[in-house]
Amino acid sequence: MAVIPRRFLVTTESPLPHDPIPTVRGPVAAAELGITLAHEHLFVLSSEFQSNFPHLWDREAGVREAVRQQERAYAAGVRTLVDMTVLGQGRDIGLVRAVAERTPVNIVLATGIYSVNGIPLFARFRGPGALIESEAPLIELLLSDITTGIADSGVRAGLVKFACERTPPDAAAHRMAAVVAEVRRQTGVPVVVHCDPFEGNGIALVRLLEKEGVAAGSVVMAHAGDSADLEGLRALADTGCVLGYDRYGMTPFAPTSSATPPSPHSYGPGTPPSCHPWVTVVLCGAHGESLDENGELIKTVTLEAGQVVHNRGESLPMRHYVRNLSDQTLVMAAIELRTPTAPEEGPSS
């Protein structure tokens, strides 16, 4: 799920560099993608371990489980997911195609390198001036994923991924940013960045990509929603990039003590009227009414897809309800923005 900066309004009528969008089963018009999960992983594998120790994982059982989860997602209204599994995470086009053949969910694939702390071994000693003198090896490989297809499958990638958890970005990150920027320049595909939301290196990565010629509006900062730093998120959004809220429920990455709960619209009795601000992202718009906890009208609202609403509790109480008055389905994602609580002081000695 992605949170769009306030100055952006996303509609399916906006011009896209690739429309129709490449999916595993073939091109799909942007207007037909429907509700989309913007950052998922069908499979994340350590390919050397699976190939050398095949007893560690049952491929067919893995496919069946992935299909089961896609069926549940489809029943909940999801029509498309973006699989951000790339080189370094065990991307396997055969596995993904096996899932796509058994589910109606559209699957968009990505290219890129997942190497958060350096250059992958394959490319580390190859390139201009390197131990093995050659052209920069990664650019052509990633380009081929987008222009001709992954592993000669004909299935083309629709995005390029850039991963960096170093703060500040090191020389390896600069080299990988240059690769990603060149792929973006030649193809026009969006750039999705795997950042470290807790160290807060997102702004530095946006600026790094900008220096390489990638406009911030073409960048999605994945996992930004793991952070509860409201001011930091505002500053990141002010760069013009898109903020990714994409790891709900994954408590090992974002513990519930600092992560945002799924819905701040309904709190128990006694909740302070402005205890935490929240952001609401409208995924499917409609016309309706905001009601207080007693069912009294607060205001009428018209919500449009792509709209982002920030509320501190002044215009709406923390406990309120929305009544849909239209014949359209209203889908919203509400994210509470918490500030970590300081530990209590012990008794003085």
Image: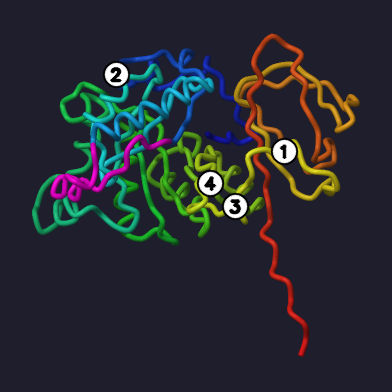
> For mark 1, what is the residue?
310
Pinpoint residue 7: horizontal percent, then vertical percent: 63, 32
Q: Nearer the viewer, residue 325 or 19?
A: 325
- CA gap between label 3 and label 4 equals 15 Å
- Which badge, 3 or 4, comes first in the chain's sequence? 4
> For mark 4, what is the residue?
224
Q: Which residue ends up furthest to the left in the rendered image?
A: 132
Horizontal relation, residue 190 to residue 299: left or right = left
- CA gap between label 1 and label 2 equals 40 Å
- CA gap between label 3 and label 1 equals 21 Å
Please, what is the three-letter code of the amino acid marked with disc 4?
Ala
- Which badge, 3 or 1, comes first in the chain's sequence? 3
- Which badge, 4 or 1, comes first in the chain's sequence? 4
Span shown in magenta: 40-58
- CA gap between label 3 and label 2 equals 36 Å
> For mark 2, what is the residue?
101
- Which badge, 3 or 2, comes first in the chain's sequence? 2
- Which badge, 1 or 2, comes first in the chain's sequence? 2
Q: Secondary structure at mark 4?
A: helix
